[in-house]
Structures are given as C-alpha cells and as structure tokens.
Amino acid sequence: MSGGDVLVSARGLEVHFPIGGGFRRKPAGVLRAVDGVDLDIVRGETLGLVGESGCGKSTLGNALLRLVPTTGGTLTFDGTDLTGLQGRRLKELRRRAGMVFQDPFASLDPRRTVAQTVSEPLEVHGLRTGRDKATRVAELLELVGLDPGVAGRYPHEFSGGQRQRVGIARALAGEPDFLVCDEAIASLDVSVQAQVLNLLRRLQRQLGLTLLFISHDLSAVRHISDRIAVMYLGRVVEIGPAEAVGTDPQMPYTQALLSAVPLPHPKLERERKRIVLTGDVPSPAAVPSGCRFRTRCPYVFEPCDDVDPALQPVGAPGQQAACHLHGVVGTPATTPEGVTATP
Amino acid sequence: MSGQPVLEVEDLRVRLRTPRGPADVVNGLSYTVGAGETVAVVGESGSGKSVSVLALLGLLPSGVATVTGSARLQGEDLLTMRPDRLRQVRGPGAGMVFQDPMTSLNPVLTIGRQVVEGIRAHSDLDKAAARRRAAELLAEVGLPDPEGTLDRYPHELSGGMRQRVIIAIALSNSPALLIADEATTALDVTVQAQIIDLVEKLQAERGTGVIWITHDLGVVAGIADRVLVMYGGRCVEDGTVDDVLENPVHPYTRGLLGALPDLAQPAVDGVVPDLATVPGVPPAPTDLPKGCVFWPRCPVRGDARCETEQPPLTVIGSADVVLPHRAATWCTERTFGAESPGVGRTFGAESPEGGLR
Ligand SMILES: Nc1ncnc2c1ncn2[C@@H]1O[C@H](COP(=O)(O)OP(=O)(O)OP(=O)(O)O)[C@@H](O)[C@H]1O
Ligand SMILES: Nc1ncnc2c1ncn2[C@@H]1O[C@H](COP(=O)(O)OP(=O)(O)OP(=O)(O)O)[C@@H](O)[C@H]1O
Ligand code: SF4
Ligand SMILES: [Mg+2]
Ligand SMILES: [Mg+2]
C-alpha cells in the first residue's frame, strides 16, 4: 500500500512446522503454515484477515506478535527488525502489540478478579503501582464500557460479551499500538457481537489503534475493516480496500469464498448461487507447484501449473490479486527442498 | 415429516446448583424433531441452549443438575434411561458435535485413535477397516491429507480442522438424531457449506433429525425447517424459518435480527454507522424476573402484564397450519409500528454497547 505510514511489515514471511517426526524420530517433512507472506499493515487501520480454515491465519497472527518462531523472511514493527529480538526489547514488543483471543470463557483465569486480570500487564511491565494502578484499572474498565464497580468480581459472574470486554481491557492495559483479534467474536451471539464490534471501532478511533481482525464472519469483517486480506494455503492471495474486495473480488478463491456467505433472509438464501469448489484440497505439507489454488480453481489454464502468480495491482486502487487471469507474472515454481510430496 | 418424530421433548426443565443459589437454566421447553427435519435453536449467550441438549444426553454433572420433563428418542425416554443404555444410544441413536472442540478431543491421543475408537464402539469393523473408514470420513469433512491427519495430534491442527474431526466422529455412526452445537462457527463459509451439504445428504438418506444450535442466522436461513428462539431458558418464539426470520414478533427476536451487520450497509458521509444492539444484560438464571423474562430490557413493554405475568407461547396468525408461528409476549404485532420486518429499529443505537449496570 502506498501513502500511509507502515506499522507492521512482513516480507517473504515463513512459518514452517516439522511434521511426522515424533519421539526421537527425524521429521518426515515440513508443513508450510505460512509460506511467503508479504504484508504491510498501516498505522491506524483495521486489516481484516479471512481465508479457508487451516490456511495459516492464526499462525500468521501469532508470528506477527513473535508468539511462534518464524523460519524465514523478514518482519519489522515500527521500523524495528523483530527477528532475533530478545530480552528487554522483546518485552517492550509484548507491551506494544497484544492479542484478543477467541474464547472469552477459556482465556480468563477463573480464580482472578477482573481487577487482577486487567492489571496483570501493568505489573509485568512495571507501568503503575498502588493507587495509580487502581485508577488505571477503573479507566480501562470505563473505556470498554464496564462499570468500574465490577473490578472485584470473578469471570463466572459475567456474560460472554462482558468477558470479551474484560479481555479487551487487559489487552489495552499496556497502551499497545497494535492488536491482533483472532476470532474474537466467534463465540458471541449477534447482539453481543455487535457490541464488541462497535467497541473495537470506537477504541480504534479514540486511541488510534492498529488492528488485525481475523474472522470467518465476512459481514463482520466488512463492517469493521478498512482493508481485507485473503489467505490461501499460507499466502496472501488478494488484498485491498474492504469495499473493493467485498464487492468485486479479483482472485477466484475470494470469489468462491464470498459466494458462500449465507444470507440471513430465507428467500434470498434459497436463491443464492454458490460457487462450489471441486478438486483436491491441497495440504500445506505438499503445496502444489505453480498457483497454489490450481487444484480447485474453476479457471485453471496453461501457466497455472508451473508459474507461481505474484500479487499485482488489479481492480480498484490499492487492490492486488495473485492470479494469472490478470496477466502472467511470477516466478516459475521450483521444488521446495525438504518437502516430500504425498500422493 | 410423517410418522413418529425422532425426538419429542416435553416440559424440559434444568436446575443447576451454583454458589449463588439454584439457577433455573431451562424452564419448560417443549419441541419435536421429525425425521429428516432440521430445528435451529438460536438465542442469547447463556440462554440455556447448550445445557438443554446436554441434559437430553445425560451429560450434565449429576450432583449439580436436576433435570425434569421427558425427552423421547424414537419413543424411548432419555431422561429415565439407565446409564448403560444411554451410552449405547449415544452414537448411533444421537450423535453430538460439542461447542468446544478443544475439550472434546483428547490432547494426548492421535486423531486416528479417537476417530477409530468412535467407529469401533458401535460397529464390528476390524482395526484396519475402521481406519480406512476414518480416513474416508476425514476426506468427507474436507480435511486435506486425511491419511496424514490421522497420525497427528489435536494441537497440530487449526481450530476449524479440530472442529471437523469432531463432526466426522459424530457422523461416523449415521445417527438418527444429530445435535450440532455451534458446529461450524470455527469454519470458513466454503467449508461450512460443504459440512451442511454432508448433513443434508445424511438426512435424505437416513431421515436423521437435526438440532442445529447456532449464532449464525444466515446458516439458519439456509438449513432450518423450524426455528426456536431461546431467552432466559424459555422458548420465546418459534415457527417456520420464514415466519421467524421474515416476520419476527417477539421484541427479543426483533432486536437480535436488527443487530446483524448488513453486507449492503450504506456508509453515511463515508462512515459506516454503528450496529444496533439490544441494550442491557441478560437476566441471571439465579434471579429470573417476574413476568416476561425479557421485560427489563424490552423497548416496547406495551402491556400492563409485562412486569407481573409470564406470557404463554401463543399462536400468532393462523393456527391451522402444520407449524404454527408462536411467540411468548404480551405485545403482538399490533403494538409495533409499520417498520420493515426483521429490522429492529425499535432498538436505537443510543446505548450502543449495553454496558454493565
Ligand atoms: N504447532 C503446530 N504443529 C504443526 N502444525 C501446525 C501447528 N500449528 C498449526 N499447524 C498447522 O498449520 C496450518 C495453519 O494453521 P492455523 O491455525 O494458522 O490455521 P487458521 O487459518 O487459523 O485456521 P482456522 O480458521 O481453522 O483457525 C494447519 O495446517 C495446521 O495444521
Ligand atoms: N456446569 C455449570 N454450572 C453452573 N452453571 C452453569 C453450568 N453450565 C452452564 N451454566 C449456566 O447455565 C446458563 C446457560 O448456559 P448455556 O451454556 O446453556 O448457554 P448457551 O445458551 O449455550 O450460551 P452460548 O450461546 O454462549 O453457548 C448460563 O447462565 C451458564 O452460566
Ligand atoms: S492463477 Fe490460475 S489457478 Fe490460480 S487462481 Fe488464477 S486462474 Fe486459478
Ligand atoms: Mg485460527
Ligand atoms: Mg452454548
């Protein structure tokens, strides 16, 4: 993306897991969970991240926060190289970049009060002590729309939406610049989802936060995001303004994905035409040569077998897609070393 | 939907012992699931959806839960069944996909062990045949490299991959009744559509009755024959999917539908407006309000009885249909303005985040 000031930047980012090894055996291969992601997240934006289950969204989110080790590529946060970051500087990253987890029920410690949960990052980072700490906790609770009077209560006394707010308050405690929300609304009913989405949007405007919003709910993603990135088998295959990607997708996988969004109106839903993907679902342990979507793509043609398409500008300003239908660009595929293809 | 229903639930009540006193989590739920029929259950978080189905299968902690009423699965009452018979019934009788895939898979056993065990518990396939069947099932739920996946451990799979393993186990015995509790929430929409196709195929082939609990009203619109809306442990509205989603009557249902982000939502001056929400918080099951369970949050409260008398489920419109549309509210459509159905404009965005009072 041109223009904006880039906060998080990944180039050729890779997270490969050894597989098939097990106890005292040599790994039989590698699983390419994240496999060459180029991504810039602009300061103050909300970037939605969508894609097939198992395509690497959570792994990418974790990698950007240095919660899983990367095996290749570069990663910078506010201009600082994150690969190899250690000690005090890693701790500082932990303060500036946080995570809101999927499950508000599992991610809070049932034996700790709301105040203890929310103030934990303040202690870890030595930010506030004594009376100041209590004041800051009250401030944070107010910020997420909770009555500061609830500070002494335990998680089981709250509803799902309220617990998710406690999780957000904790994530905000260290005054982060960047938050990854991984399926943060998935376990909530729609009216509570709406509360949390409104809250995230308000906080973002108020605090200038940068958000990576990972979700399977494409209507929610379109509602909250400035831009949307679509992943397929470890790669970003399309990215652009939310409006453009949501209404005029340029990559065949994105088109199939959007066509499968169920509509909450029985009559419209019965008439909806879904693009049904057939063909083999590839495994990230045996990534196809050429375009990684070619085993299921309805438009597959000659160059797709051996030329790996690169992201290129196409469609609306700022929109990019990796597909040869928009002109063949990319590198001829080479067999990645260490990969044993499964039949 | 002819012949004997697969499941008939009558006046199901669940009371749980909690440190804050007894909690009335399910309060008189009655419904039937016909052969091949799909009943969708929607409603507020904490309204008793999961507890009500766990109660059917005897899966609530026994010292804590008191379950009354009756629930006949193909004629046999599940609630009075001996535990060994209940264990036989789970699987081929009633398969369940639990809401939390992390806790329903054993972290120290491979996926293969767990799927094969599920198959062998209710069939006489030998190990090798069961393993072949397991790989087939994983392929049917769309997992790549099914053979390889059998040898992996739960933590090596993504959330949605684990969820599909649970679905494969539940489908492995072609159950007469399938209970899916948020079974596809961790899946992307293309995989979700594939799972729904698979369940519909099973319904067509085997007449499987399905209870589908979900927050996703788009999924409901696509799969449900009938919808049941729960609030505060009660059914507050039910009817055909068209009746409930296109012409909701209960103020809670209207609020719920109004909170949906609309894919076609227009931006006003370049800003997407806030979503409508249902202000306030749900009632604590230890302290349910007198009168209508929804009244403390209800923007209508159009009747003197709202705060004092519990409204019964009454038929709205014609009673002379197979599935009448019913709602438990004192305020039927007369009370509402003529605003478009399904869009809960009665709930403004004034208190958009409904904080804790
Ligand atoms: N610790 C691990 N060891 C081995 N493989 C892993 C590990 N964690 C994830 N994977 C694999 O990496 C791939 C990507 O997983 P990831 O959890 O990032 O997917 P996702 O896009 O978040 O999917 P979902 O939408 O289902 O949450 C999957 O194939 C998964 O099996
Ligand atoms: N083991 C338990 N002990 C005490 N209370 C419980 C227990 N299990 C559930 N509850 C309470 O019972 C009520 C109903 O919970 P249930 O899980 O059925 O809600 P739900 O409708 O499935 O919600 P969600 O949509 O969030 O899954 C809640 O108030 C919950 O806190
Ligand atoms: S490059 Fe070829 S296979 Fe890949 S998405 Fe485009 S047309 Fe389909
Ligand atoms: Mg994930
Ligand atoms: Mg539940």
Image (cartoon, coloured by chain):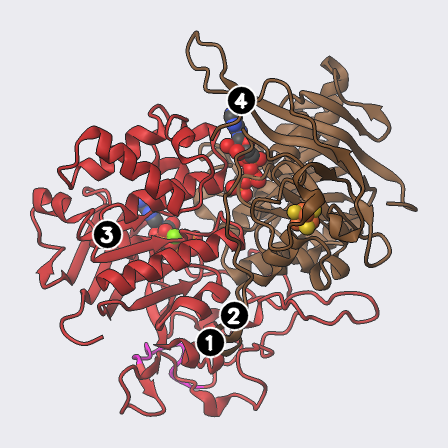
From where the camera sits, is residue A245 visible? yes
Residue A32: quarter of image: top right
Q: Is residue B54 left or right of residue A78?
A: left
Q: Which amino acid does label 2 sit on?
A: Pro
Measure the alpha-carbon separation of dots 1 and 3.
30 Å
| Along the line of sight, the residue nearer the viewer: B194 or B336 | B194
Q: Does the magenta stretch include residue B222?
A: no
Q: Mark 3 points at which residue?
A: B174
Q: What residue type is labelled 1?
A: Leu
Identify the image quadrant of the N terminus of chain B. Answer: bottom left
Q: Colour of chain A?
A: brown
Residue A84: quarter of image: top right
Q: In this view, does B90 lie to the left or right of B349?
A: left
Disc 2 residue: CB within 8 Å of ligand 2:
no
Q: Mark 1 points at which residue?
A: B245
Measure the alpha-carbon separation of dots 4 and 3.
36 Å
Classify mark 1: helix, strand or loop: helix
Magenta segment, which residues? B303-313
Q: Name the residue under label 4.
A: A340
